[in-house]
Amino acid sequence: MADAADVALAAGLMGGGRAAGELGLSRSEFARAVQLGIVRADPQGAAGAARYTRTELDRVRSAEGFPDTLLERVETIAGAEAAAAVLGVGPSRFTRLARCGHIAPVGYRINRYRAVVWLYLTAELRDFAAREPGMLRGSAPPGDRELIEARADLRPRKWRERHVGLLLRRTADPWERAAVLASVLPEDDVRATVPDPAERILLGALAPPPPYGHPQVPAAAEVAVRLLRAGPPDESGWYRTSLDFALTGARGQSKSTGERGPT
């Protein structure tokens, strides 16, 4: 009797490992391509591991310049020293640019010292250098100096903003969109915004998994999980307002269709 993988393959569906191989990508490169919306999972797939259609892979392969352009779009650089080299500046200047929010990380990893190592898209670094040559030399502008004096670090916030935006673009389902927004909030904020326990259970069930590369080792995971939650009050307040708005739409759909969420 054929197993689930054989059935899926016969239907033109394949798992991430096989899809990555067919596109000439490593697992991490493929995960980045999915994260960025370059490769789209089958929206009709059953719950569980994502599946990808032959049609979707053919679409990606048909793009001009494949595979070089695809590899360029998903290439990442880890850490300030390597990223600074792409920009042609020193690590301290790059760190200032990133901490002040001019360059947004696309991912992270936790090293053996439990320090966050931010990942940046190489193509975006090159674009920034071409677009903002003035930022690569001279003194810091007044706004940056104020942030530096306040010892601000906008990298986690910028990463969350990007992460949430990418997740929201991958679904039109109102309850799934609400779950994305709820997943960024601390538990107390979710309880305050969503007083109905049934709705909180549903949002938890629909919550997106941690991003690819999120550590499994408890000590590293403890550091990484803090990156997933909104920090400053103005940031968490924005997500609470957005969640409340999303829930209004989700509840409205449930009342009209009788599907998905509590009524």
Image (cartoon, rainbow, N blue to C red):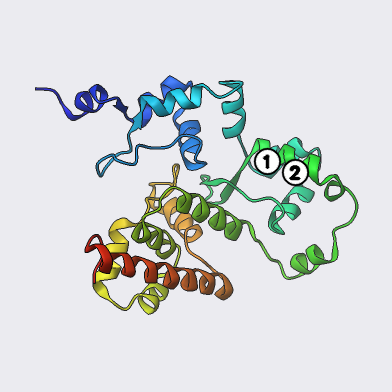
Q: Residue at x 50, y 49 (%)?
A: 166
Could you tell me which quadrant the C terminus lies in?
Answer: bottom left
Q: Is residue 15 visible?
A: yes
- What's the amino acid at mark 1? Glu
* CA neighbours of label 2 inside 10 A, class few (<14), some (14 to 19), many (20+): some
Q: Residue at x 56, y 21 (%)?
A: 67
| Residue 88 falls left or right of residue 200 | right
Alpha carbon separation for disc pair 2 and 1: 6 Å
The image position of residue 250, as x and y in percent, is 35, 65
Q: Residue lying farthest left?
A: 1
The image position of residue 124, as x and y in percent, is 68, 40
Residue receiving disc 1: 124
> Taking 68 as reference, is 88 above or below it?
below
> Taking 49 as reference, is 191 above or below it?
below
The image position of residue 125, as x and y in percent, is 71, 40
Q: Residue at x 30, y 39 (%)?
A: 49
Q: Residue lying farthest front?
A: 256
> Taking 76 as reference, is 207 above or below it?
below
When asked about the image quadrant of residue 68, the answer is top right
Contact between marks 2 and 1 (CB within 8 A): the answer is yes
Between 176 and 230, which is closer to the camera in this rendering? 176
| Residue 129 falls left or right of residue 193 | right
> Taking 90 as reference, is 255 above or below it?
below
Between 49 and 222, which is closer to the camera in this rendering? 49
- What's the amino acid at mark 2? Phe
Residue receiving disc 2: 128
